[in-house]
Image (cartoon, rainbow, N blue to C red):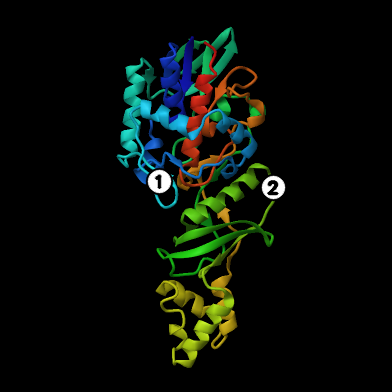
Amino acid sequence: MKIVVVGGGASGLVFSILSARQGHRVTLLEANSRVGKKLMLTGGGRCNLYNAAVDARCYNDPYFVGKVFENCSKEKYLRVIESFGIFTDVPDGEGRVYPITYSAASVVDCLRFEATRVGVNIVCDTRVDGIITGEGYTVNAGGRQYCCDKVVIAVGSGSQSARTGLADLVGKEYLTKTVPSLSPLTVNNLPKGTSGVRAKCEMTLLDNGRRVASERGEIQFRDFGLSGICTLNLSAYIARAKVKGEKNEFDVSVDFLPDFDEKTLRNILMNRQRSGYTDDQLLVGLLPNKLAETIRRAVAHDDTDGLVRLVKRYVFKNAETVDYSLSQVTSGGVKCEFVDEGFNLPDGIIVLGEALNVDGLCGGYNLYFAFVSAIVAAERLER
């Protein structure tokens, strides 16, 4: 069978390798000058291959993802990537699993070398303009026509990279709206002078005051808004709501001392006052200095209860995701309801990875799905 794979990212490379091993003739078309451009950026350049706690509930469509995971266990996944020459280290404290090289570049090289070894024809600097269906498929790309028996769409998402052109490759009836996800958040009331501050906390996303989700970890203040893994994970819920067309008003409530209840914190502050601490010294040692100064200035003199409330429930108003350039993934894409267990659309075109309306949380979940979707689709490919 002659197969054209559109997109040389994680899912495109994995599918190409596995289908070529089955004896199919595979041509991979990549718009960039080399394959794996976005893969090079994953995990801060270290390539977070998966998370030890991976679970379908970590994704926006747990039912669909659960069905996919039934066909590819973590053990099978590890066997497959080891066959590419990729070996993993033990999980870190957050469950994140990296290659033993801790280098995304080495992962890309393993995939690229294996694709070449098994005979995949890699054509870079070639953007696909459209696909014609009929007796087989004709892929128009770079002024040439590629005739084939099967087309695979593995263009990923627009996050951190150029426009994917997904809407030009599949029917609009199959697509949702797309929104940048796993991104920093802009807020209306960002405190001045806090850019660069990092603090341990618990963040809660509120939709018109109703709790949507909570994340515990580190918040990072930037000149335009909030960042850090907690923030990125909460942004996924905002993005998913936008994909559905919901009209929401999201706020983020932050507890800067989640290990202290209000009574304990109040006692600490009152003891400090009795010991002669000035107002400016009350939060020293409890919060980063700049953050302590900002919160203290926002509360009236001697208002201990107000200070406790603000430390425990600092609400950032009107939280919004930022643009694609600062997002890790995209929420939205091809609707999962239209693909079968082999990821085939009704017209027979296969769609993989982030081109589907599947997005997970930070920590290796999205790259894992990209790999696994390719593994399952290749196994179910007609011989």
**Which is nearer the eye, 100 or 280?**
100
Residue 320, by quadrant, is: bottom right
Between the C-alphas of marks 2 and 1, the distance is: 37 Å
Across and down, in percent, residue 108 comes to 35, 32
**Number of residues whose C-alpha sits closer than 10 Å to that of mark 1, classed few (under 14), some (14–19) or many (20 or more):** some
Residue at 63%, 17% (x, y): give it.
347
Q: Is residue 156 shown left or right of residue 46?
A: right
Amino acid at pointer 2: Glu
Is 147 located above or below residue 122 in the figure?
above
- Secondary structure of the residue carrying numbered label 2: loop
Q: Which mark is residue 167?
A: none
Residue furthest to the front in view is 75
**Which is nearer the eye, 266 or 147?**
266
- Secondary structure of the residue carrying numbered label 1: loop
Q: Name the residue tied to disc 1.
A: 91
Q: Can residue 8 be seen in the rendering of this structure?
A: no
Across and down, in percent, residue 100 comes to 32, 40
Is 160 located above or below residue 170 in the figure?
below
Residue at 64%, 36% (x, y): give it.
63
Residue at 56%, 84% (x, y): give it.
304
Q: Can residue 12 be seen in the rendering of this structure?
A: yes
Q: Is residue 34 shown left or right of residue 277?
A: left
Q: Nearer the viewer, mark 2 or mark 1?
A: 1
Q: Is residue 21 shown left or right of residue 54?
A: left
Residue 172, by quadrant, is: top right
Q: Total marks drawn?
A: 2
Is 174 located above or below residue 121 in the figure?
below
Q: Name the residue tied to disc 2.
A: 246
Amino acid at pointer 1: Pro
Across and down, in percent, residue 98 comes to 37, 42
Residue furthest to the top in view is 135
**Which is nearer the eye, 379 or 36?**
379
